[in-house]
Image (cartoon, helix red, strand yellow):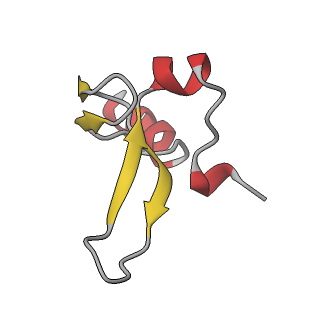
Amino acid sequence: MTGGASHEKASTTVPSAFGWCAWHKGHAEDLRLIQIHEQGSGAGGNLFACGPCRQAHHLVPLADRP
C-alpha cells in the first residue's frame, strides 16, 4: 500500500496551514509563523507569511531560527 509511505513522508515535514498572510494581505496555503506580538496593554497577535512572501521578503519562520 502506498498510503503508508505517504504518511511517513508527511510526518517528517513541517505541517502547512491555510490562513491569512500578513505580508500580501490575503488568504494562502503554506503559512508559517514569523512574528509574535506580545500582549501588553493592547491586543496581542501573530503574523504569518506564505511561501512566496517568505522568499520575497527573506522571512525566517520562528521554528527555523536558532
The quarter of the picture where residue 6 lies is top left
Q: Nearer the viewer, residue 21 or 64?
A: 21
- Classify 47 as above or below 4: below
Can residue 11 be seen here? The reply is yes
Quarter holding the C terminus?
Answer: bottom right
The quarter of the picture where residue 25 lies is top left
- Classify 29 as above or below 39: above
- Classify 32 as above or below 28: below
Residue at 31% x, 69% y is: 44
**In this figure, what is the number of numbered marks?**
0
Quarter holding the N terminus?
Answer: top left
Q: Is residue 60 left or right of residue 25?
A: right
Q: Nearer the viewer, residue 13 or 31?
A: 31
Q: Nearer the viewer, residue 61 or 39?
A: 39
Find residue 65 and report its horizontal and vertical position in percent: 71, 54
Identity of the residue furthest to the right in this view? 66
The quarter of the picture where residue 32 lies is top left
Find residue 40 and report its horizontal and vertical position in percent: 38, 82
Find residue 38 and report its horizontal and vertical position in percent: 43, 73
Identity of the residue furthest to the bottom in this view? 41
Residue at 50% x, 37% y is: 9
